[in-house]
Image (cartoon, grey):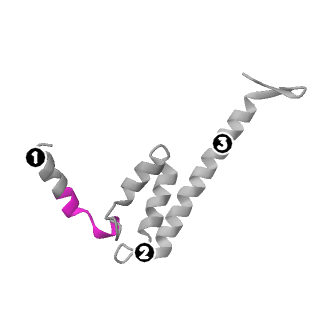
Amino acid sequence: MTTSTFIGMMYLWLMTPKYYIGKTLKIEAKDVVMDFQADNYNLGTALTYIMRAGKKPHNPICDDIRKAIAHLNFELERQDEQRATSQSSQTTTGKYAVLY
């Protein structure tokens, strides 16, 4: 790691709001999301809102919970659309499904 990279990382760490960082392990919510849900924006975003709920000054916990629910609803809609598209591309012949 170069000195400039290290300095850049330290600057980011020092400038990161405390409500983004966990209390015990000092892990940022985004790092947890990247480990568990890097391939799904809506689930990842919902997780970050839940993990930081009520921690940001002057931001009621209910606002973060509503935002998380909105992203979960977006993902449910996306999954339903994908399932409908997948099912419409299948036809059944007797007891076997034929995929096109």
At x 58%, y 50%, the residue is 75
Label 1: which secondary element: helix
Residue type indicated by callout 1: Ser
* Distance of label 3 from label 2 (alpha carbons): 32 Å
Residue at image mark 2: 54
Residue at image mark 1: 4
Q: Is residue 27 magenta?
A: no
At x 57%, y 52%, the residue is 74
**Farthest residue, direction left:** 3
Q: Front-most of 83 and 39?
A: 39
Q: Badges 1 and 2: C-beta atoms under 8 Å apart? A: no
Q: Quadrant of the C terminus?
A: top right
Within 10 Å of disc 3 (Cα), the crowding (few <14, some 14-19, many 20+) is few
Location of residue 18 with respect to 90 vertically, above or below: below
Q: Which mark is residue 22?
A: none
Residue 20: x %, y % from top left: 34, 65
Within 10 Å of disc 1 (Cα), the crowding (few <14, some 14-19, many 20+) is few
**In the picture, residue 59 is in which quadrant?**
bottom left
Label 3: which secondary element: helix
Residue type indicated by callout 2: Gly
Answer left or right for 68 relative to 24: right
Residue at image mark 3: 81
**Farthest residue, direction front:** 25
Q: Front-most of 89 and 34?
A: 34
Q: Is residue 19 magenta?
A: yes
Residue 9: x %, y % from top left: 19, 52
Residue 48: x %, y % from top left: 43, 60
Specify the segment rendered in magenta.
11-20
Which badge, 3 or 2, is on the more N-terminal residue?
2
At x 21%, y 62%, the residue is 15
Answer left or right for 12 relative to 23: left
